[in-house]
Image (cartoon, grey):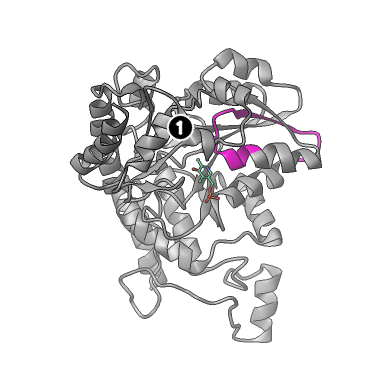
Amino acid sequence: MSDLHELRKQALAGAGIDTLAVRAGQSRSAEGEHSEALYLTSSYVFDSAEQAAARFGGDEPGNVYSRYTNPTVRTLEERIAAMEGTESAVATASGMAAILSTCVALLKSGDHIVCSRSVFGTTTVLFTKYLARFGVTTTFVDPIDFTAWQKAFTPDTRLVFVETPSNPLCDIVDLQRLADLTHEHDALFVVDNCFCTPALQQPIKFGADLIVHSATKYIDGQGRCLGGLVAGPKNLVDEVLGFIRSAGPTMSAFNAWVFLKGLETLRLRMDAHSANAQALAEWLLAQPQVEKVYYAGLPDHPGHALAARQQRGFGGVLSFCVKGGREQAWQVINATRVMSLTANLGDAKTTIVHPATTTHGRLSDEQKLAAGISDNLIRVAVGLEDVNDLKADLTRGFAVIA
Ligand SMILES: *Cc1c(COP(=O)(O)O)cnc(C)c1O
């Protein structure tokens, strides 16, 4: 049984990402289940007092308690590590738990973070409101201004944090260039790969030290569960794992099982999201009520060539400005009947949102201006519906503001 598992594992070394998404990490139980088993158990039973002592002492590998290890969660961790091309990975209760655990495990009071200004809003809150209380400071920079990154480093900089493509304007960051700069300063380069997933982008190839995910988005793909992941070399992931075991932001086995099922179709879904987003972006460009479209798949997007080099597809998120202001943007949003008005993304269902008054509502007017979050901006996370129905859904609103 275990020999066969080892042989299967060897056969997957160097396998394509589509194979890894379906196969990596699975170790069947003696029951021979074809679909990954869901181990809903908080603790594990030992054969003898001797074995219990050996397990607790770390002399014998094996499960002790599900805050430490769970076979279903372990399968997901191995699969993500294989797909990201990293040595190891650890799962967390949410994307934010992945980011928090990474920072707490690897930073100490007095350390400094350089972070893209265009990251997930809660990441900004975590860094400025909470990490700052423990003496970890952050400088935020315009992600596509390389000079700004260079200037932001201090002798205390230990970590650089970036998302690409950015939300909601699809700015594309040159990962290799930023990784090189980060390493010149002996800092760790952390990439939030939530928008692309390993199906479209493997940051490790461009020098990332650690990759964090909100599995809640495309990895689930159907809006059911919260989860997060941290992938990277074993020594760094083990540090994060140590914190997770002590602090407890562990992924539930059930959620891990849902994500495993999600991964099996990840590539197909990301390709379909990208194709739909591309078609919708091109169509939006031609609409008289639209002032500007932000999508890296459009040839005149400033990050187009870089995204084409760095990514396998342009992803499912786009933004556009309607002619007018907040009133016109809200009218278009309110006229939709197919799309869901929600801030979530990475779902089979298309979502539409007004960033200036929701996801980016906490920013001051000045910060919004600097980040390009104008009142007439609308973000669409394009789902898997027939794109003609999505066009018709927006046309309803365009007729109102025409
Ligand atoms: C949603 C999101 C997060 C946070 O993930 P949760 O699972 O909601 O905690 C982090 N980064 C990005 C880019 C996200 O979209």
Is 241 displayed left or right of 335 in the figure?
A: right
Residue under the image location 54 percent in, 24 percent down: 371
Q: Position of residue 223 (x, y in %)?
A: 41, 56
Magenta highlight on residue 109: yes
Q: Position of residue 21 (x, y in %)?
A: 34, 53
Question: Circle 1 is placed at which residue position?
Answer: 168
- Looking at the image, how many numbered discs can be counted on the residues? 1
Quadrant position of the C terminus in the picture? top left
Give the magenta-colored segment's residue range.
Answer: 108-124
Given the current orientation, which residue lies at the most extreme bottom position? 48
Is 303 displayed left or right of 19 in the figure?
A: right
Residue 37 visible? The answer is yes
Magenta highlight on residue 115: yes
Residue under the image location 65 percent in, 73 percent down: 55
Q: Nearer the viewer, residue 326 or 136?
A: 326
> Tag 1: residue type?
Pro
